[in-house]
Every structure is written in structure tokens, then in C-alpha cells.
Amino acid sequence: MGALWSSRPPSSILIVGSGVFGLATAYSLSKNDTFANTSITLVDRQPFPAPDSSSIDTSRIVRPDYASKPYANLAATSQNLWRTTFAPEHYHENGLVLSASASSTPYVKASLENVGSLETCRVEELNTEEDIRRVSRIEGKSGETGYVNWSSGWVDAEGAMRWLRLETEKLNRVTFVTASVSKLLIKHATNTVNGVSLQDGGKLEAELVILAAGAWTPSLLDLRGLCKSTGQILVYLPITDAEQTRLQSSPTILNMSTGMFMIPPSRNLLKIARHGHGYTNPTTIPHPESSDPDERITVSLPYTAINDPTQAVPEEGLQTCRSFLSDIHPSLSVPSRPFTKSRICWYTDTPTGDFLISYHPTYKGLFVATGGSGHAFKFLPVIGDKVLECVMGRTPEEFKGKWEWPKERVLEERWEGDGSRGGPVGMVLAEEMARRRSRM
Ligand SMILES: Cc1cc2nc3c(=O)[nH]c(=O)nc-3n(C[C@H](O)[C@H](O)[C@H](O)COP(=O)(O)OP(=O)(O)OC[C@H]3O[C@@H](n4cnc5c(N)ncnc54)[C@H](O)[C@@H]3O)c2cc1C
Ligand SMILES: *[C@@H]1O[C@H](CO)[C@@H](O)[C@H](O)[C@H]1NC(C)=O
Ligand SMILES: *[C@@H]1O[C@H](CO)[C@@H](O)[C@H](O)[C@H]1NC(C)=O
Ligand SMILES: *[C@@H]1O[C@H](CO)[C@@H](O)[C@H](O)[C@H]1NC(C)=O
Ligand SMILES: *[C@@H]1O[C@H](CO)[C@@H](O)[C@H](O)[C@H]1NC(C)=O
């Protein structure tokens, strides 16, 4: 194990990445007496809020109904904070309809059993098409089986992140730096990391580096077989005031068969997205841990509107979003009303969908907090404290073997996932983009 917690807190901590994992960690460190004498620096490649980061968007679902008990319990704790003290003005409790075609529902069933065992029971099983249509207030076609949990909600993600940034600034403990990290400073002779070098030629040194660069983390550390970045699609449709009023209190709809979901609209913008297997973007880069520039590895890395300001979702994705909208709200899905904005947002997937919150097994002074796997946002109110527990060598009992550094790397073909994804498997971004060009 790289660097276990000793009796003394580090004199300096550098956090790379100001998303859910990085910013929440900075906030928790700032509040915690143990770190009163530790200097804290948070570096991000973009000024806050980074527009292409996974944590910045109009909305994120907050649901405690996980198939896995430790996550269900942590989500319930987190949700109580969303309701009360943690950016409550950005939290909305509209309910969530999980639906699926009758045949493909082990995840739905396992989730239902789990939520059923928790105390609040504002859950209804939905066993017919008509049930699903009534509850989700859609005009069109629906699945045949599922359930609604009226206690689930959604949060304005950018609003909540801005709130947390301000709360952190008020504590006046963190030095915020805008710079792009190019490499970890690794001393191979002693297997120690003591900072990072920056693209502009500078460097930032620290006794402990916490790597929380989201889907970009695999560009700074060899995470093959541990983390994989996958691109997920989002599209936005402007709606009228009357439509906003009609739809804003409806529940979120998530179709477990296809991974397609629609969160209630906010500020006259309807969002449709896919919680899917996503696109990979295989990229060959110098080995991030090697001092030999000729040693190269190929990993999936994000490609976003910062790389290409004209980026749009591939045709395959646009059509899938369009047909989902036609199914559920045919009156909104007319040719005269195109999606006006689309985006590819990057998950940091792990073989099992568990987060990776751990010291590095080889390098002293390096800790990793990533692997959001498309479900970390709801934990924003609690994840910083959990990261600190792990930093202090006290990984919560129920997350041992989940968040800790895996004993082995798993070939990507063998990843099991968390069972929650829908839609096509194995798509490569460049290939899907090329398809669109050839059609035009
Ligand atoms: C489309 C989509 C929908 C989602 N829906 C939900 C949901 O409904 N509910 C839910 O709970 N979760 C959801 N998630 C998951 C959740 O949003 C993510 O798990 C979470 O935001 C990940 O946070 P992060 O800190 O790991 O990454 P990020 O937010 O991406 O933060 C990483 C930061 O690192 C910075 N960085 C990267 N490289 C460097 C570098 N070299 N130098 C300096 N800085 C760097 C980036 O600029 C970025 O700001 C969704 C995610 C996506 C993409
Ligand atoms: C911080 O430094 C002060 C002054 O040296 C010392 O009294 C205190 O014990 C230190 N706190 C921690 C948590 O190390
Ligand atoms: C529904 O959501 C609430 C969260 O607010 C949760 O406490 C509950 O366990 C979930 N399930 C049931 C059966 O109520
Ligand atoms: C979910 O997808 C399945 C499979 O495509 C479909 O049969 C069903 O109608 C969909 N349900 C909703 C609510 O979109
Ligand atoms: C500091 O963090 C640890 C780990 O999360 C926690 O157990 C402890 O209560 C925190 N202390 C304060 C003062 O917040």
C-alpha cells in the first residue's frame, strides 16, 4: 500500500480536479480540525465551473433506490442533506419512474426489494402500461412493468456545485489554481509522488496528491483495467412557458431497457439523455507513469466541446433521443422543433460500477478519488467526508472491497458493470461520428 495514514496529517494536499470528488474533498478538508495546519490547493484545467466536466449540467437524478445496500443507505443519508441543509434550493422532489420491458428487469426487481426494506414507503409498483402512463404523465407509449418512488428527486447540478464552491471559499482555506496538469511528479527510485507538473511548465508540489480528474484521470495514471471513460449523450429541447408549467412537476422517467431518461424540465429546457454503455474514445498517449516518451499506451479519454466547439451527438444518438421523445411525448416531437443543443458527457466507469477511493498501491503520496460510474452526483453532500475517512485509513466497513484499489485489473471485455445500463454496447465515438459525415 502506497501511503497509509500515519499519526501526522500531511503538511500540504493538492487536489487535481474540481468536480464532485475534488471540490467535495476540498470542502471537507477545510472544515476538518485534523487538517487545520494543512495547506490545501485545488487545481483545475478550466476556470470554475468547467463546462465540459461531468459535474456541471442542468440536472442530475437523486435516488436512493440502489440494488446495492451500502450505496442505498449512503444515498438516503445524502438525500436528507439535499432536503435540509445542502443547497436545498437546488433540490426538487418530483419522484422517479423506473420502467422496463417485462423481460429484462432483474435490476429493477433488486432495486425494488432494497427500497422496500427502507422505512419511508412512498413507492408504488406499476404493473401495466396504463399505470406507467398515469404516474409518469406521459401522453404516449410506455413500458409494461416498473415502479415509482415519489421520494426520489433531482438537483440542478451546476447550481449545487456553485453553492458548494461559495461555501468552500467562505472557509478561506483553499488556494484555487487554474492550470492544466500534464504529469504526476513521480520519484521512481522511492516510488513517491510529490506533486504535479503543469502544461505551462510550472509545477505544484505537495506531500499528498489527490487525483480527482474524473474521466481525464486515465490520462494522468495508468488505469487500464480499472477505469474507462465512456461518452454519454444529452440533448436539450426548448419548450414554452405552458409546456414548462405542464411538465415541471412530473416525475423523472428512466427506461431501464434502453437507458433513456427524461428529467423534468427547468428554465424552459427539456433534457433527454441515455444512461448507457456509451462511446469509447481510444487515444494513444505517452505512458503517464513512464519517463520514457516512447513508451505509449492506448486508453479511452474524453473528447468534448473544449476540444471541438462544434461537437454534437452522433446521428445514432440523436435518433435514439428523438424516438424516445416521440414515444413518450409525441406532441413535442415534431420536425419544426429540433433539439437546439447536444453534448457528450463522460462517465468514469469501473468494472463493477463501484467508486475508486484509495491510496495508490505503489506510489507513496498519491491518493485517487474517482470512478463515478455515472452515479456519483447524488452523493455530493457526503462524498467529501467519505474520501477523508479513506484518506485517514478508515475506509467504511461496508465499502471495503468496493472503493479500495482492486487486487487485479480486469480485461474490459469481462466488466460486469452495475446492471443499470441500457442501449447499444461497444460503440466507438470516431466511428459513430464518421457515419454521420458519410450520410451528409
Ligand atoms: C450525462 C451524465 C449524467 C449523469 N447523471 C447522473 C445522475 O442522474 N445522478 C448521479 O448521481 N450522477 C450522475 N452522473 C454522474 C456524476 O455526474 C459523476 O459521477 C460526477 O459528476 C463525477 O465527478 P468527478 O469529480 O469524478 O468528475 P468531473 O466533474 O468531470 O471533474 C473532473 C475535473 O477535473 C478537471 N481536470 C481534468 N483533467 C485535468 C488536468 N489534466 N489538469 C487539471 N484539471 C483537470 C476537469 O476540468 C474537471 O473539472 C451523470 C454523469 C453524466 C456525464
Ligand atoms: C496545528 O498547529 C498548532 C500550532 O503549532 C498546534 O498547536 C496544533 O496542535 C496543530 N494542530 C494539528 C491538528 O496538528
Ligand atoms: C424511496 O425513496 C426514499 C428516499 O427518499 C427512500 O428512503 C425509500 O427507501 C425509497 N423506497 C421506498 C420503498 O420508500
Ligand atoms: C422502455 O423501452 C422499452 C423497450 O424499447 C419499451 O417497450 C417501453 O415502451 C419503454 N418505456 C418507456 C416508459 O419509455
Ligand atoms: C474529520 O474527518 C473524519 C473523517 O471523515 C471524521 O471522522 C471527523 O469527524 C472529522 N472531524 C471534523 C471536526 O469534522
Image (tube, rainbow, N blue to C red):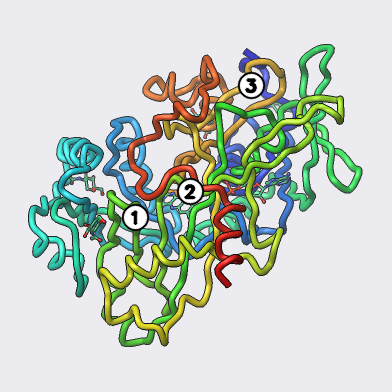
Label 1 or label 3, whichever comes before in sequence order: 1
Report if residue 20 is visible in the image. Answer: no
Q: Residues within 10 Å of mark 3 (few under 14, many from 20)?
A: some
How many numbered marks does the figure carry? 3
Q: Residues within 10 Å of mark 1 (few under 14, many from 20)?
A: some
| Tag 2 secondary structure | loop
Dot 1 amino acid type: Arg
| Residue 319 left/right relative to 301 | left
In this figure, which residue is indicated by the disc labeled 1?
A: 83
Ligand 1 contact, mark 3 (Cβ < 8 Å): no
| Residue 368 left/right relative to 196 | left
Query: Residue 56, located in which quarter of the rendered image?
Result: bottom right
In this figure, which residue is indicated by the disc labeled 3?
A: 360
Label 3 or label 2, whichever comes before in sequence order: 2
Q: Is residue 159 above or below residue 406?
A: below
Dot 2 amino acid type: Gly
Residue sitting nearer the eye, 93 or 106: 106
In this figure, which residue is indicated by the disc labeled 2?
A: 278
